[in-house]
Image: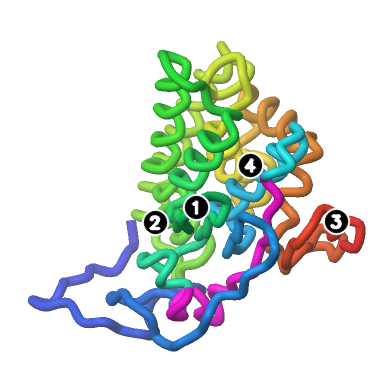
Amino acid sequence: MTDKVYVPPKVWTWDKENGGQFASTNRPIAGATHDKELPRGAHPFQLYSLATPNGVKVTILFEELLEAGHSGAEYDAWLIKIGDGDQFGSGFVGVNPNSKIPALMDFSGPEPVRVFESGSILVHLAEKFGAFLPASGPARTEVMNWLFWQMGSAPFVGGGFGHFYAYAPEKYEYPINRYAMEAKRQLDVLDRQLAEHPFVAGSDYTIADMAIWPWYGGLVLGRAYNAAEFLDVQSYTHVMAWAKAIDARPAVARGRMVNKTWGEPQEQLPERHGPGDFAKA
C-alpha cells in the first residue's frame, strides 16, 4: 500500500477545494444560500429532481403507476441542477431541509404534503395508489426489508466506491479496495436473493426493485463509474438477468429519461409536464 499517511488536525476545518468532482455541491452546513421559489405546474404532484439513481427511483414509480392505469399519478418534474446549487435555494430547502434530490410536493389532498428522501417518496406514492407495495403482512415486510437495505447500503457504493474509484482527485489503494470489497459483497447479497426469486422481494415487482435497480442495475449494466470490468459484474448472473429484465420495461425507459441532461439527446427529458413530452425527446 502506497497511500500517504494523513495525520488529522485537532479540529477539522473546511477546505472548499478538497472533495473531487463534486466539491462545489458539498459543505458542512445546512440551510438555504439564496432566495429562489420553486416552480409549480398543473398536476397534483410536483417533483424536483435530477436523474441520478436516487432521482430515477421516483420517476420510474410515477411512470409505472401511469402505465398501470393510475391517471391520478400525473406529475410535473422540474430539473434541479445540483452542480449550480439549485438544491440550496430557499424554495427547495423548504421542501427538503437536507438539500438533496429528489423532493416532492403532493397537492392531491386537502393539505399540501412535502415528502423528501427517495424511500419515503416511494412508500408515500405506493400507499396512496395501493400499488407496488403489499398492504400488510409478511409480503409488505419483505418489501420494506429490501427498501431499507438499499437505503443503508447504496451510500457505500456511491459515496464510497464510486467516489474513490471515479471522482476523487487522486486514487488511493486503501479506500478503493475497502469499498470495492463492500460493493461486491452487496452484489453477492442481491445475487443470492435473485437466484431464488424473480424480483428482489419475491414473486412480484415492487418499489424494492425500483429502489435497488437504479443503483445496482446501473452498476452491472455498465452505466456507473466505468467499473463493470473492475468489479467483474458479469459473474453476478442473477443480478444481471434481473437488471436486463427491468431495463426492458417501457415505464423504466421513460423514467430514466426524466430530469436527464446528459447522454444521447433522444434519452433526455430535462422536464416533464405531461405524457406527450416523451414524443418530443
Dot 2 crowding, Cα within 10 Å, few <14, some 14–19, many 20+ = few
Residue picked out by circle 3: 278
Report how far apart the C-alphas of labels 3 and 1 lie in the structure: 31 Å
**Amino acid type, residue under disc 2 in the picture:** Glu
In this orientation, which residue lies closer to the viewer: 172 or 40? Answer: 40
Residue picked out by circle 1: 110
In this orientation, which residue lies closer to the viewer: 134 or 156? Answer: 134
Which of marks 1 and 3 precedes in the sequence?
A: 1
Report how far apart the C-alphas of labels 2 and 3 lie in the structure: 43 Å
Looking at the rendering, the stretch of residues picked out in magenta corresponds to: 73-91
Which of marks 4 and 2 precedes in the sequence?
A: 4
Where is 199 relative to 78, above or below?
above
Identify the residue at image location x=69%, y=41%. Answer: 221
Residue picked out by circle 4: 61
Report how far apart the C-alphas of labels 2 and 4 lie in the structure: 38 Å
* Residue found at the very far right of the displayed protein: 279
Q: Nearer the viewer, mark 4 or mark 1?
A: 1
**Amino acid type, residue under disc 4 in the picture:** Leu
Identify the residue at image location x=75%, y=62%. Answer: 273
Dot 3 crowding, Cα within 10 Å, few <14, some 14–19, many 20+ = some
Report how far apart the C-alphas of labels 4 and 1 lie in the structure: 23 Å
* Residue found at the very far front of the displayed protein: 110
Residue picked out by circle 2: 173
Residue 93 appears left or right of 61: left
